[in-house]
Amino acid sequence: MPPALSYGETVREGCLCPFLSGGECPAAKHPRGLLLIYTRAVDIVPELPKSAATPSPGGHSPSDEGADDYDSEARPGGKRKRGSAGGQNSHKRGGLKHKGNSVEEAEARSLQNRHNKRAEVHQSKTFSADIHAERTRPGWNGKAPDQDTQALAVKSWLDGTLEDKMVDFKLIPYTLRGSAHPTYLLDHEGRKFLVRTSQCEWLKDNADGFWEEIKTFLENILQFEESNEKREKDPRGPHVPCILGYYRPYSKSPVLAKYHTKFEKEAEALMNSPIFARLVTWASKLVEVHFPHVAKRYKVCGEWHRTHSKQGPPFGLFWNFCVNGMLLGQYRIHCQPHADSKNIVGVCLIIVYQIPASIQAPTFDHTKRSWLCIWEAGVCIELPPWVAVMYPSSLFYHFNVDIKDAKIITTNGPMPTPKDIAECQGRGSLVFFNQAAMFQSSETGYATLKAAEKAGKSRVRNFGEDINAALQMHAVYAPLT
């Protein structure tokens, strides 16, 4: 283990191997690895009154009732309006329209301001989304560790030694404060790289009907996988990722995913159900509100493909949807270390659900079980059922961990006790995402990067510009000194 660093410092090793093993890389062949964080990485930014605070550049303050005024003052030529207490009430609804925005954009902006003012905000002192992200050289998507490093990371996660390297990770619990109270994680530069919503009440209230649709969809797929002894072991864990929608593996045109083709009847029944249609609308709206530039990029991609590929994204802003299915003997969805490296530099959206009380006792304890860890950011965040979380999963190594006595646990240890099983029972997850290949077509104007390069187009993205556009700047407030 390298010597401890002073507060706020980080180090990048040649690969993950020395960090996990305490020695040199045995293969001496890994030119690049993950960011290794040995000190606390994230501190909460407290909410302060305006009289004792000063804004950092860009964005809005979640704690400032005059957030709209601050934003207009920051615009070139903008004038700050003074009105009634709270500031926001002095602006008429739809006031953004005259500045060239559509009614939909104005409404989204109004909703975004409302969430910003209620948000719980945490900002890293060391983590930078563009510097510490793992991405391919062309910059369209993320980059996964090589097989040896991945195997070592998973082994350390399973045998419990990985938790020794995570003692200074920041734990971010969930506070039940009602609706429209999201949690924002910001990097060192103030870019919002993760959003956790409050619990979705309409989804929670319809848990029985929602689970019935999911169970019906999964039934034949899981029976098929149980009987298929040659089923490949997924790097995310021993569950079945049932992916629907279109992708472009190594073809010129989008094709349907394997499970969508093989179980088309089940897929269409799920997609045509009213509760799923509402879920898709909600997921897309969340991205529009919290990551508007990402939403715009997703919309442009869909429009291009509707014209040129004669196919559009089946899930609102998203081309793909995944239900993680539990096999016999499994109690929950609990992912091991991985990166969704084929996804675009944007955000995926994960929804956590709980099998309802009418099916089994609702015993999953989200205060202790299956928190989400973002490795490079040095943070673990609690995910209760019925919340959504959005972040660029292609760029960061991530996995689930358990929490015991405010400490991180990365192994199930010996055979689980009845209490362990009860605390884990019934946690499921869904994911909406987009793969980079779909955007390579829409943003170069050619079916493949090879064809674009042959036509004289660059196959390389400006990663810095993409990350700055995707992860919107967000103002935070600090005491005057």
Image (tube, rainbow, N blue to C red):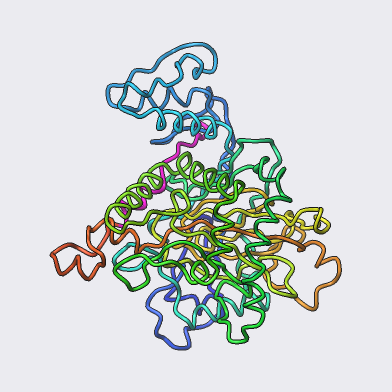
> Does 299 appear above or below 229?
above
Rendered residue at 50%/66% (across/down): 260
Report the magenta residues as a range: 463-481
The quarter of the image holding the N terminus is bottom right
Indicate whether residue 138 is drawn in magenta.
Answer: no
> Percent from the top left, x then y, of residue 128?
43, 54
Q: Is residue 395 visible?
A: no
Rendered residue at 51%/16% (across/down): 89
Of residues 7 and 12, the one nearer the viewer is 12
> Does 401 appear above or below 1?
above
Give the residue at the far front of this rendering.
265
> Does 416 appear above or below 468?
below
> Percent from the top left, x then y, of residue 84?
51, 11
Q: Is residue 299 left or right of residue 187?
A: left
Indicate whether residue 471 is drawn in magenta.
Answer: yes
Q: Is residue 444 visible?
A: yes
Of residues 251 and 195, the one nearer the viewer is 251
> Percent from the top left, x then y, of residue 469?
35, 47
Quarter of the image holding residue 379? Answer: bottom right
> Percent from the top left, x then y, of residue 57?
39, 36
Of residues 388 and 430, the one nearer the viewer is 430
Rendered residue at 28%/61% (across/down): 441
